[in-house]
């Protein structure tokens, strides 16, 4: 199987280690600057984040779109006795998630300032970047787990110390939910390493490629271990019954925390599904696909319905995330090229759009100190630019053609339609519901006459507008011309689908590429019934 | 001269008195500790008021470090390094694990590593204790001296190759710790803790001793070497198998008491709460190390053939400790009690390693013990500072807003707590990681799942402390800004945090050391011939000059069936 062949070409500069270690170094620098020098802390944090963004864009430019495997691979032994290696690599699946991280982190820093204890705030925010980069770039299960967990503590402190309202409750809930998921995943990672090592007689291994290509696991073992990984990722995404931490965490988190949480951290889960679900456990993925696709669908509808009933604007956007991430999950488990591509597009778009919406909500909170819809009214009259920006990102979020959100949702629906026709039909209802809750909220907040408290609402300042410029550009660019992005994603996705087809006897990816659409659909549906 | 207590038995089959060969270099760490403790007491009584806490602390630290240094050549010998370390001469000494004093005291990687750990834990505990004494204006030599003597017992346990020797080590260790628990004369809870610990500890010792007696009845020996050989060569049926099983069960109960595994844990929250915090730091670290060393020696090394019988018991103990400790800790409002229950939960994790009963399991035990020693000493060092004068302010409210009042102290505690929760990039993560490997490796993945889920529950209780320190405003009981951190305690804290982060970031050195430290059934020295000594001729106290009395044990009739 060619997937594991590491294409070690490209730059002579170790760009991937730089992406991981730069934020760590930045955080350490911040830690050594004495408290009270808030400006200096901010400067170091922003410099680190901007440099991180620049590096990620440089990597994007240097990325070879024709190669499907891992690029810029760097590998060093870390813990010899356990065969743990520090392996980093990037392919079409992780490429844009890395770039997204690189773009959103500086923007989140520019867009929001903490109200107190600057040093800790910048320290944790910068460290969070290292964790996210590590997850997307890791090529070793152990390293991946460490990075996955590294995102936990910074966000815990960001929510708990700089959040609002019931921040402690939200922080604890976030920590415990996520940790429960990853606790199971740790056991499964160890089991995988031990079982695989036993098969090859070479002791323990955490090497992603070796485990995936080894194929020594029994069917039952694959399924059980897969469920352990699903536990961790389903909490992180979050998939429907595990989502309850998200609205609390989002609502109480400080603006930058919300932006990074929605923009990057939720993608750790969906990315995990692709890299560590489909790739490591192809058979179990096919087996569980109908269940997970259904959970994704429930998430889409449930998130939309609950969002419509929210009285808190930030909570509304949080629930819309549940709905949008439902699309991403559904696309993954359609198990075809369209679905997977759509899912990755959906992750990118959701990061950009929801990130922007949370930034706008942060501006709103700074002015009015509330997210309650009932307290807000007629903002369009007093702040037309603000309202215009909100409209733009809201429409993108709904999935209006020509804006970014449409591309991902369309591809996901297409992929799902090929695999499980009726699921796609129901999911399309979610798109309509999205329009409903978004427009309704917009109407209540922005239309009508401003009440007394809202009359002094100041429109957006230039300094507040600038961080949004790249996001506006991206929303239009992706919406109108997604080709350069899709053509970089496609080779890797195609390779992954081939890998699944090869590893799972009798499985044929229900896609358009083989020309026969009806037959796979039927196969998919019968599997769906069998699996539930 | 020697610190090992010997005992004599009247030989049944011969009138000749046989003295075992003693490899004195192997005894040096032990001797340094024992002498260090005794000399400290002597000096303190001779010099009276002229010496105080600084001298006691200096003496204890030096004793620990010298004992540590003298253990290095032993490590070199066990590992077969071909470089000269201190006095050790590679040409004359055979490499590899060996046993001495007639096979009663084993020197293998396991015992040497744990000896080193104990020798390092003593100085750190002494620094914490010095901080408390200095702050409270106390001047007592008993604390440091008892700690050194107790550690002597711990070292004996780590190397015990004979059940009686193990018991002697256990008693030396325990008796000193009972007094340490009762040492705060101003708090009545401390006296109560000491008495409670003593009464229940005496019970558990009795269990243990009775277990030894039954095992002796079943196998005809107390030496682990002979027991292993006997069990390997004989199929136990009927009453003798019952005897041995009952004996093992009683010994498990005795050791489970020392490690505070549920349901033998009830003393630990009360004792941790009542005893002086610096003594608790010692109890929670060195006593646990020694008890788990004993457990591995008895169960894994000695009764490995009975693993199928005792593994289910340990599994139950592990699950109860893991879940019970974590759950009960949730409702505690006293930080010392909270940490007591959390240490019960940690014991459950270490039991996973013992339960595995193989090399991976032993590795997990060692990693966990090394990591946990420094975590727990550091944590109680923080508690001893926040407890303030009189060592009484241990409610959770005392930690409210500590991050604002004393950021360095709160930051230190946060690192240690996150490590206890098993967050990556701290040593605690690798401890749990190895325990999980051990469980998965022996096909008991369900235990690993239980363990990790209980770790999540436990994480909540560490978060409660973190929340109190960082997310809440200071309250009435919070220390006033500028709370003094005694210099010695500060040094101890820096050491503990440094070890925690170092292992967390580069676990390589620790894991490679641990890989080289398996416990072994160490046969008596090769000089004695390949045959085993007869059961009843084992031990007799004797100086170096008496070694010539040794006869060839192979010529004596053996009551045990097994020959290698």
Image: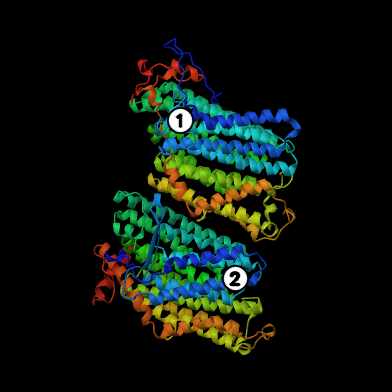
Q: Chain of mark 2?
A: A
Report x, y in % for residue B147.
62, 35
Q: Where is residue B149, by image quadrant? A: top right
User: In the rendered view, does B320 fall on the left or right side of A295?
Assistant: right
Using residue B280 as the reference point, say whether residue B508 is left or right of it. left
Whether B446 is drawn above or below B292: the answer is below
Q: Residue furthest top?
A: B15
- The one nearer the camera, B214 or A289, is B214
What is the CA distance from the residue labelled 1 to the residue labelled 2?
59 Å
Q: Name the residue that disc number 1 marks.
A: B106
Q: Which mark is residue A464?
A: none
Q: Is residue A61 above or below residue A153?
A: below
Residue B115 in the image: state x and y as whole percent: 52, 36
Which residue is denoted by mark 2 in the rendering?
Answer: A254
The answer to whether residue B335 is seen in the rendering is no
Q: Are marks 1 and 2 on the same chain?
A: no
The percent position of residue B422, horizontal first and vertical second, equals 51, 52
Specify few, some or many for label 2: CA neighbours under 10 Å numbering under 14, 14-19, or 20 or more: many
Please state, as top left, top right, bottom left or bottom right, where the N terminus of chain A lies in the image: bottom left
For the C terminus of chain A, the image quarter is bottom left
Q: Position of residue B365 (x, y in %)?
A: 47, 42
Q: Which chain is mark 1 on? A: B
Look at the image and tell me whether residue B395 can be seen.
yes
Classed neighbour count for the residue bearing mark 1: other residues with Cα under 10 Å, few (<14), some (14–19), many (≥20): many
- For the residues bearing labels 1 and 2, Cβ distance under 8 angstroms: no
- Secondary element type, mark 1: strand
Closest to the observer, B390 or B198: B390
**Residue B37 located left or right of residue A515:** right
């Amino acid at each position: 199987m060619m997937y594991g062949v590491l294409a070690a070409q490209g730059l002579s500069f170790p760009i991937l280690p730089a992406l991981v270690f730069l934020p760590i170094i930045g955080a350490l620098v911040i830690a050594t600057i004495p408290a009270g020098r808030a400006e200096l802390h901010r400067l170091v944090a922003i410099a680190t984040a901007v440099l991180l963004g620049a590096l990620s864009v440089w990597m994007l430019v240097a990325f070879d779109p024709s190669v499907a495997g891992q690029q810029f691979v760097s590998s060093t032994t870390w813990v010899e006795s356990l065969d743990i290696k520090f392996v980093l690599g990037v392919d079409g699946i992780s490429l844009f998630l890395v770039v997204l991280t690189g773009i959103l982190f500086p923007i989140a820093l520019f867009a929001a300032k903490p109200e107190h204890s600057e040093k800790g705030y910048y320290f944790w925010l910068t460290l969070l970047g290292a964790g996210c980069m590590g997850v997307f770039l890791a090529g070793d299960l152990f390293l991946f787990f460490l990075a996955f967990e590294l995102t936990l503590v910074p966000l815990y402190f960001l929510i708990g110390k700089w959040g609002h309202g019931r921040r402690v409750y939200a922080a604890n809930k976030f920590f415990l939910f996520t940790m429960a998921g990853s606790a199971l995943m740790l056991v499964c990672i160890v089991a995988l390493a031990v079982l695989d090592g036993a098969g090859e007689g070479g002791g323990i291994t955490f090497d992603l490629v070796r485990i995936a290509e080894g194929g020594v696991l029994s069917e039952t073992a694959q399924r059980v271990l897969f469920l352990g990984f699903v536990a961790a990722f389903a909490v992180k995404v979050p998939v429907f019954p595990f989502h309850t931490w998200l609205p609390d965490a989002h609502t109480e988190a400080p603006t930058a925390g919300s932006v990074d949480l929605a923009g990057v951290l939720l993608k750790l889960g969906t990315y995990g599904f692709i890299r560590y679900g489909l790739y490591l456990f192809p058979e179990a993925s096919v087996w569980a696909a109908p269940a997970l696709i259904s959970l994704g669908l429930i998430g889409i509808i449930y998130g939309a319905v609950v969002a419509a009933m929210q009285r808190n604007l930030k909570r509304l956007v949080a629930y819309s995330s549940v709905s949008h991430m439902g699309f991403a999950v559904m696309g993954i488990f359609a198990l075809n090229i369209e679905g997977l591509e759509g899912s990755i597009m959906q992750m990118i778009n959701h990061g950009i759009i929801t990130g922007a919406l949370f930034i706008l909500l942060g501006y709103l909170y700074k002015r009015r100190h509330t997210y309650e819809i009932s307290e807000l009214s007629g903002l369009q009259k007093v702040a037309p630019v603000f309202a215009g920006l909100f409209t733009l990102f809201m429409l993108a979020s709904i999935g209006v053609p020509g804006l970014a959100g449409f591309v991902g949702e369309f591809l996901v629906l297409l992929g799902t339609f090929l695999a499980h026709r009726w699921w796609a039909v129901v999911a399309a209802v979610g798109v309509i519901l999205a329009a409903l809750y978004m427009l309704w909220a917009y109407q209540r907040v922005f239309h009508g006459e401003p009440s007394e408290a809202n009359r002094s609402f100041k429109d957006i300042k230039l300094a507040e507008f600038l961080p949004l410029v790249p996001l506006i550009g991206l929303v239009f660019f992706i919406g109108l011309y997604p080709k350069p992005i899709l053509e970089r994603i496609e080779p890797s996705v195609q390779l992954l689908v081939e890998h699944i087809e090869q590893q799972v006897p009798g499985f044929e990816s229900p896609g358009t590429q083989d020309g026969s659409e009806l037959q796979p659909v039927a196969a998919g549906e019968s599997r769906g019934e069998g699996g539930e | 001269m020697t610190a090992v207590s010997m005992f004599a038995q009247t030989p049944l089959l011969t009138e000749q008195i046989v003295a075992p060969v003693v490899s004195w270099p192997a005894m040096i760490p032990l001797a340094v500790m024992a002498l260090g403790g005794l000399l400290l007491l002597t000096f303190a009584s001779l010099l009276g008021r002229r010496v105080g806490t600084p001298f006691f602390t200096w003496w204890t630290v030096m004793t620990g470090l010298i004992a540590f240094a003298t253990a290095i050549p032993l490590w070199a010998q066990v590992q077969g390094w071909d470089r000269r370390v201190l006095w050790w001469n590679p040409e004359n000494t055979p490499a590899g694990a060996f046993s001495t004093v007639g096979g009663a005291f084993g020197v293998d990687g396991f015992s040497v590593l744990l000896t080193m750990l104990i020798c390092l834990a003593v100085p750190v505990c002494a620094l914490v204790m010095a901080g408390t004494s200095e702050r409270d204006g106390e001047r007592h030599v008993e604390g440091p001296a008892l700690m050194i003597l107790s550690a002597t017992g711990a070292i004996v346990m780590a190397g015990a190759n004979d059940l009686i020797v193990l018991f002697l080590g256990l008693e030396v260790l325990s008796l000193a710790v009972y007094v340490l628990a009762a040492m705060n004369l101003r708090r009545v809870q401390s006296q109560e803790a000491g008495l409670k610990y003593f009464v229940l500890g005496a019970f558990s010792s009795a269990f243990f001793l009775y277990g030894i007696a039954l095992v002796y009845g079943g196998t005809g020996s107390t030496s682990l070497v002979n027991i292993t050989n006997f069990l390997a060569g004989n199929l136990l049926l009927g009453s003798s198998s019952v005897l041995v099983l009952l004996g093992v069960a009683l010994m498990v109960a005795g050791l489970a008491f020392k490690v505070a595994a549920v349901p033998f844990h009830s003393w630990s929250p009360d004792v941790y709460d009542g005893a002086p915090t610096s003594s608790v730091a010692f109890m929670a670290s060195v006593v646990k190390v020694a008890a788990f060393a004993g457990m591995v020696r008895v169960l894994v090394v000695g009764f490995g053939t009975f693993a199928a019988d005792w593994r289910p018991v340990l599994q139950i103990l592990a699950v109860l400790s893991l879940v019970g400790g974590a759950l009960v800790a949730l409702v505690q409002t006293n930080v010392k009690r909270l940490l007591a229950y959390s240490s019960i939960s940690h014991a459950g994790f270490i039991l996973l390693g013992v339960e595995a009963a193989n090399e991976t399991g032993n590795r997990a035990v060692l990693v966990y013990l090394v990591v946990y020693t420094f975590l727990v000493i550091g944590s109680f060092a923080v508690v001893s500072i926040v407890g303030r004068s009189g060592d009484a302010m241990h409610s959770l409210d005392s930690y409210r807003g500590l991050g604002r009042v004393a950021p360095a102290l709160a930051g230190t505690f946060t690192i240690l707590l996150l490590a206890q929760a098993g967050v990556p990039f701290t040593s605690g993560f690798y401890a749990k990681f190895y325990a999980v490997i051990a469980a998965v490796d022996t096909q008991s993945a369900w235990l690993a799942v239980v363990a990790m889920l209980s770790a999540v529950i436990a994480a909540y209780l560490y978060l409660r402390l973190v929340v109190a320190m960082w997310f809440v405003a200071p309250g009435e009981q919070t220390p006033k800004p500028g709370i003094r951190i005694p210099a010695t305690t500060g040094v101890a804290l820096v050491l503990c945090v440094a070890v925690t982060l170092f292992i967390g970031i580069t676990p390589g050195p620790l894991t490679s050391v641990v890989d080289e430290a398996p416990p072994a059934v160490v046969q008596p020295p090769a000089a004695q011939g390949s045959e085993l000594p007869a059961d009843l001729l084992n031990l007799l106290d004797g100086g170096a000059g008496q070694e010539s009395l040794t006869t060839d044990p192979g010529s004596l009739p053996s009551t045990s069936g097994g020959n290698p």
